[in-house]
Amino acid sequence: AQTVTQSQPEMSVQEAETVTLSCTYDTSESNYYLFWYKQPPSRQMILVIRQEAYKQQNATENRFSVNFQKAAKSFSLKISDSQLGDTAMYFCAFMKHPNFGNEKLTFGTGTRLTIIP
Amino acid sequence: NAGVTQTPKFRVLKTGQSMTLLCAQDMNHEYMYWYRQDPGMGLRLIHYSVGEGTTAKGEVPDGYNVSRLKKQNFLLGLESAAPSQTSVYFCASSGRQGPFTGELFFGEGSRLTVL
């Protein structure tokens, strides 16, 4: 079974600064997908960024980027120029390479990020 | 854009009562999921469905039943509620059309309290 570990329960950073959220995972799979989801106070989960394990290039979405270290099984999220709207709970998640019936997400326990004005 | 809709949003139950949470999606997605979210534990998969008429157990299925009679609906039932089932429940769906993305689309959550 896969496990996802987020070792930082809470973090805070000043507005406009850069912050990095950590995630490690354990799997015997060689091909898989990793995700970061954001859960703002409204509670609805939103996909932030996705990484495919067979791609060496780190994914980037505007101010959000990842540092994917496959050998170390590490998948950190960097938020640049942080904004007040980035305040949320962030979840790291793992999915095996999709086969029929295999498309399930395993989540970490989350990191609560607060952006300070 | 409705997306994934959960009803009810809030419910208080007494121990031993039964209830059903309804999830409806309008994106013609094949896959649907029920997760529960508890403080310090992230989201844990209860049951999921890979298509109409199919269901499968997730990580924490005990005490819950599900049904997927129609492609757009996924029902989560509690036959005899227990205080340990106090949680926020999330429904999600994902599709298999087009290039695979793996993205799950979530509802807004349903907060259930069992006294």
Image (cartoon, rainbow, N blue to C red):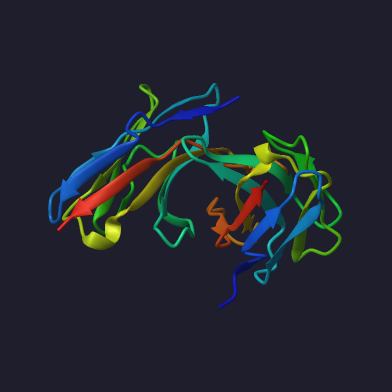
Q: Classify residue A78 by image quadrant.
A: top left
Q: Is residue A7 left or right of residue A100?
A: left
Residue B106: give x, y in percent of width and height.
56, 58
Q: Residue at x 41, y 40 (%)?
A: A110
- Residue at the far bottom: name it: B1
Q: Which sits in the foreground, A9 or A59?
A: A9
Q: Residue at x 63, y 44 (%)?
A: B86
Q: Which sits in the foreground, A112 or A54?
A: A112
Q: Residue at x 48, y 56 (%)?
A: A45
Q: Residue at x 23, y 61 (%)?
A: A84
Where is B17 relative to A33, above or below? below
The answer to whether residue A99 is visible is no
Residue A89: give x, y in percent of width and height.
38, 48
Residue A15: give x, y in percent of width and height.
14, 55
User: How many numbered discs, if any?
Assistant: 0
Where is B19 relative to B25, above or below? above
Residue B81: give x, y in percent of width and height.
76, 44
Q: Is residue A71 left or right of residue A14?
A: right
Q: Is residue A48 left or right of residue A33?
A: left
> Can you say which quadrant of the picture contains the N terminus of chain B?
bottom right
The answer to whether residue A45 is visible is yes
